[in-house]
Image: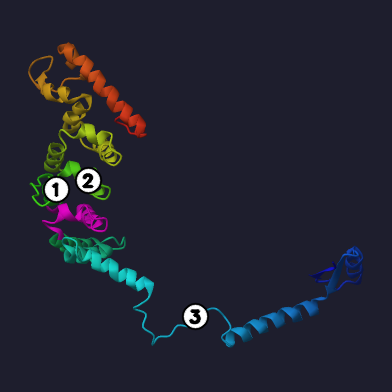
Amino acid sequence: EQYRISIHIYLPEDSRNRSHCRSSLQFSARSRFVCTNMAAASSKEGGKKSTYRKNAAGGGGSKRKFDKHSDTSETPANKKRALKHERQSHRKHATAVRSAKEIWNDLRVKTNDKDTNTKLCNELFGLLEGKCMETCMQHDASRCVQGVIQYGTEQQRRAVVTELCESKQDDSNNGQQNLGELCKIQYAHFVVLKIIKYCFRDAECVKMVVRALKKQMTKLAVHSVGSRVVELLFATFPAKSIAPLKLELYGPQYALFATSVPSGNGASNSLPSLAAFVEENPTKQGATLEHLQLLLQKGLDKSLTGFGYF
């Protein structure tokens, strides 16, 4: 079979260069090269463009023209959006959350001045007051509670912390949602991180957080989400405040018996170290080592050894 290959070569105007280009072309029996000059190539390109323009003008293209009189409410995107709004309308505090997201969208603008942020934060806190426990577990409303903690006043932050730390029994869910459970939830744990970051200077907030997280350190330390809270808590809060929480990592019996013992002079009380506790309670050494080995093994399995408390 004979194959025809068309090559468009732009030859220079210099006669020597033109002759050199002609001599470099090789012809074979099974192929044929057709050389065209610049004018012919440009005319062909112009013809292609003109043909494309004619096809586009004549409606031969695949692009669909926009008709402003057509009804676009039945498009798949609009149907999906309407279904999303309908599903969100059945959630708890749907109206308040919808308004709170609009305020948060204006609050997060970095060019806002202090007065604007204060005004927006007051409106946001008014919508979420008494609803923080339910809203912080929603993926889109959690950032609104975070905005109150970040931009709110000291009284507003303390009110949010009090609501989250001193929550009561919820009969509808047959369980208790407290700060320790929020640390394990994907979106709610960001609220706890904001509390640790912006409320560590408030002594009242520190006491409430430490009291709410007692007897839960062993589970949070090896939890994939809660471990982030433990890491920031131990790195931010005062060492004296988190000392009772660190004791729980040595085992339940250690946290139970190691309350406060007299120091060397006997004048003040302080928490004992692990070595002092084992020395005074030799029978607890085996249980303590077994608990620490199990805790470390869980951390290795989940690749949590990069945290500082390990």
Q: Indicate the amino acid at tag 1.
A: Leu
Q: What residue is at 24 percent from the left and 62 percent from the top? A: 104
Tell me if mark 3 has few (under 14), some (14-19) or many (20+) residues whose alpha carbon lies within 10 angstroms of its own.
Answer: few
Tell me if residue 105 comes above or below residue 142 in the rendering: below
Instruction: Please give the name of the residue rendered at 17% of the width and 43% of the height, measured from the top-left corner.
Output: 179
Q: In the rendered structure, which segment of residues is drawn in magenta?
A: 128-156
Check contact, mark 2 vs mark 1: CB within 8 A: yes
Q: Quadrant of the C terminus?
A: top left
Q: Residue 274: percent from the left, percent from the top?
A: 21, 19
Image-based side of 35 in relation to 57, left or right: right
Q: Main secondary structure of the magenta part?
A: helix
Nearest to the eye among marks 1 and 3: give it.
3
Residue 92: x, y in percent? 16, 60
Numbered tag placed on residue 164 in the rendering: 1
Whether residue 153 is visible? no
Q: Place residue 232 in its image quadrant.
A: top left
- Provide the secondary structure element on which disc 3 rests: loop
Task: Name the disc covering residue 64, or none.
Answer: 3
Residue 79 place in picture, x, y as percent: 33, 72
Q: Which residue is mark 2?
A: 192
Q: Could you tell me the amino acid type at mark 3? A: Arg
The alpha-carbon separation of the residues under discs 2 and 1 comes to 9 Å
